[in-house]
Image: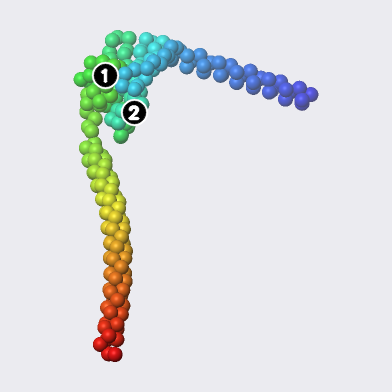
């Protein structure tokens, strides 16, 4: 008997859980019955949803704009329209009033309209790093050229020393030969003078 009660209890709990789940899905469907996503300019994507009360929400997400991550355009059934942009850097949200069509404008135009300023210090740091890298590359190139020239000078010096050494050896041989020749002549002249 207890087995039957346990089985009935489990079936009852499963039925209640299924009913609650179906109820939640229906409620969420009523809030966003239609939703579409489409590509937009400036490497972005727009997701549009319309709630059952007629409120239309268009969320444009920018993939690689450094100043703005998304802009949300909400249009209420009475025609009231709000445009809010989110800063990529700080996550701050601001109203955008000066951009006519936020779903087509560039990310920079939206960021300007929201008043998100460009962080010049990051640009300056990036430029300084690039210039430092360029100077490093030039110094490396100059160092390599200096090493090449030093090798050439060293090789020329060795070649010159070999040439001088060879010439000196040749000269010494000639001098030695002439000295021997001269000694022989002197020796034979002495023999002629002394009988």
Q: Is residue 112 above or below residue 122?
A: above
Q: Where, by quadrant of the figure, is residue 41 drawn?
A: top left
Residue at coordinates 35% horizontally, 13% vertically from top-left? 56
Badge 2 vs badge 1, beta-carbon distance below 8 Å: no
In the rendered view, does 54 fall on the left or right side of 6? left
Chosen colour scheme? rainbow
Q: Where, by quadrant of the figure, is residue 71 drawn?
A: top left
Residue at coordinates 26% horizontally, 44% vertically from top-left? 134
Of residues 149 and 77, the one drawn nearer to the viewer in this rendering: 149
Residue at coordinates 26% horizontally, 15% vertically from top-left? 101
Of residues 87 and 43, the one drawn nearer to the viewer in this rendering: 43
How crowded is the residue under tag 2: few (<14 C-alpha within 10 Å), some, or many (20+)? Answer: few
Q: Residue furthest front?
A: 195
For the question of whether residue 95 can be seen, the reply is no
Q: Is residue 24 above or below residue 130?
A: above
Q: Position of residue 53 (x, y in %)?
A: 38, 10
Of residues 69 and 149, the one drawn nearer to the viewer in this rendering: 149
Instruction: Assign the N terminus to one quadrant of the image.
Output: top right
What residue would you read off at disc 1? 105
For the question of whether residue 29 can be seen, the reply is yes
Measure the alpha-carbon separation of dots 2 and 1. 15 Å
Residue 64 circle label: 2
Marked residue nearer the N-terminal end (2 or 1): 2
Instruction: Assign the C terminus to one quadrant of the image.
Output: bottom left
What secondary structure is marked by label 2?
A: loop
Q: Position of residue 115 (x, y in %)?
A: 22, 28
């Amino acid at each position: 008997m207890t087995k039957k009660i346990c089985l009935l209890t489990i079936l009852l709990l499963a039925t209640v859980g299924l009913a609650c789940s179906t109820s939640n899905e229906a409620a969420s469907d009523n809030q966003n019955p239609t939703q579409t996503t489409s590509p937009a300019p400036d490497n972005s994507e727009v997701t549009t949803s319309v709630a059952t009360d007629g409120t239309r929400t268009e969320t444009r997400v920018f993939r690689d704009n450094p100043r703005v991550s998304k802009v949300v355009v909400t249009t209420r059934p009475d025609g009231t329209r709000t445009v809010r942009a989110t800063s990529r850097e700080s996550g701050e949200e601001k109203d955008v009033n000066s951009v006519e069509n936020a779903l087509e404008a560039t990310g920079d135009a939206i960021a300007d309209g929201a008043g998100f300023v460009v962080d010049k210090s990051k640009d300056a740091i990036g430029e300084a790093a690039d210039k430092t890298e360029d100077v490093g590359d030039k110094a490396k190139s100059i160092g390599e050229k200096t090493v090449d020239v030093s090798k050439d000078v060293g090789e020329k010096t060795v070649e010159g020393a070999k040439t001088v050494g060879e010439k000196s050896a040749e000269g010494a041989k000639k001098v030695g030969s002439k000295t021997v020749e001269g000694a022989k002549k002197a020796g034979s002249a002495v023999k002629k003078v002394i009988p």
